[in-house]
Each structure stands twice: as structure tokens, then as C-alpha cells.
Amino acid sequence: MKKTFIISFLVIATAFNFTACKSDVKKEESTTEDSIVSKKSEAAFVVANAKNEINFTAYKTSAKVPVGGQFNKVDVISGGEGNSIKEAINNTQFSIPVSSIFTKDTSRDYKIKKFFFGIMADTQLLSGKLMITDDVNGIAEIKMNGISEKVPFTYTIVDKTFNMQASMDVNNWNASAALESLNKICYDLHKGADGVSKTWSDVALNITSTF
């Protein structure tokens, strides 16, 4: 999944500013923009500017056949900058639009969005925060279906690439009804050689940021 982390807020002009001449207002705006750009460029590593790939693997049938996918868009809400990769990742808050899901099958994408995420309460976005706990471990706090849960992950940093891996059980977010809904609409597709249709609740995560 290629995703671009984009977030920037700029406050310009007050009621008093509007009474001033246009040339002064433009000059002040330009100065403010320049100072903000300069401030952001001071960080050696910026998550929003990295090449970010958020991949997941779900499973179907009794044999636990993997089904891969990704999210093509991720936004940085706060944090995401530092003088090291570890510092940039730590305390990064993010949001992921469910609409950006991509599994190389448009029919499957539609079913996941409508019959899985669509069954949940107010889940147009997946949001969360990444917290580094030591040189190999961290915690991802993920909000879905109106519930926030912590997911432990392991990570590596090689050269300028951060990679984290984790596994989450969607039932921890009270998603059993959504899972049943998805399995029902995909009943025959999720049926194995034993004749049993099954959609597993565990999902593997593999996330990479290359700076």
C-alpha cells in the first residue's frame, strides 16, 4: 500500500488584518508560511514524507488460507517528526480511511467496506497512535468500532527503513457481528475442502516506512 501522510494547519489573518492594505496582508502571510516550512524542515525524519506501506493479511477457510490487502491512504494527525527514525515513529497519531482499502479485487474491496466496516459503529476511519517501548518492541493503540485497544508489535530499523509487525484479533473490538456479516456474504468463497465456510478473526499487520 502506498500511502501519503498529509496534515498541515495554517491560521491567517484576524478581523483587524482585513482592514489593512492587501500588500501588508500578503507580506505577513508569506512570512508566516516561510517560518512554518522552515520549522518543519528542521526534522531529519518526517513520517508524512516517507514511503509508507500498510499491508494486512486476513484468513479464510478451515485451512486458514491467507488473503492479503493494503490501505492506500494514511494521514498523520500529530507527531511524526524527529531527529531519528525511532523518535519520528514514537507518538505518531494517524488515521486511515477505510475507503482506501485495496486487495486487487474490487468486488472483495466493496464487500469488506460494506459488510465488515459498514456494520461497525462510525468506522469510516481507523485511527490510532504508535508508541515505541524499547529497541525492538512497541504498542499500537488502534480505534475501531468505537473502541480503542492496544496491540503489541515488534519492529526493526535497517538503514532508513522502519518495519513493524503485529497481529490483532478483531473480536477485541466487538467485531464479531461484522465478521459474521462478511462471512455470510462471502459464504461460498470462504468454504474450504471440508465444506466449512470460515472467516478468521485474527489479522496480521506488516507496516513499513522508508525515509
Image: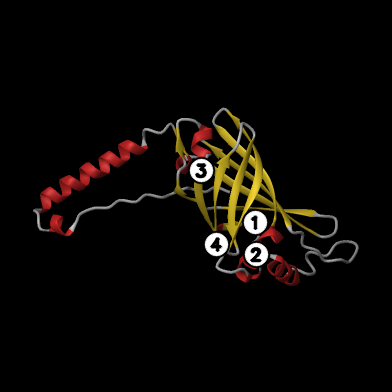
The residue labelled by disc 3 is 91
* Callout 1 crowding tier (Cα within 10 Å): few <14, some 14–19, many ≥20: some
3 vs 4, front mark: 3
Q: Quadrant of residue 35?
A: top left
Left or right placement of residue 78 versus residue 58 in this view: left
Q: Could you give the CA–CA distance between mark 1 and mark 2, rounded to whole angstroms?
A: 10 Å
Point out residue 115 in the picture as x, y percentages from the top left corner: 65, 70
Depth check: 113 or 137 in front?
137
Between the C-alphas of marks 1 and 4, the distance is 12 Å
Label 4: how many residues lie within 10 Å, few (<14), some (14-19) or many (20+)?
A: some
- Residue 47 in the image: state x and y as whole percent: 48, 41
Tag 1: amino acid:
Thr
Mark 2 or mark 4, earlier in chain? 4
The residue at which mark 2 appears reads as 112
Q: Earlier in the sequence, mark 3 or mark 2?
A: 3
Mark 3 burial class by Cα count in 10 Å: few <14, some 14-19, many 20+ = some
Res. 74 visible in picture: no
Residue carrying label 1: 103
69 sits to left or right of 52: right
The reply to whether callout 1 and callout 2 are in contact (CB within 8 Å) is yes
Type of amino acid at the residue the image marks with label 3: Asn
Q: Earlier in the sequence, mark 3 or mark 1?
A: 3
Extreme residue toward the right, this view:
194
Q: Secondary structure at mark 3?
A: loop
The spot of residue 10 in percent (x, y) is 30, 51
Closer to the chain start, of discs 3 and 4, is: 3
* Colour theme: secondary structure
Q: Which mark is residue 99?
A: 4
How far apart marks 2 and 4 lie (CA) works out to 10 Å
3 and 2 marks in contact (CB < 8 Å): no
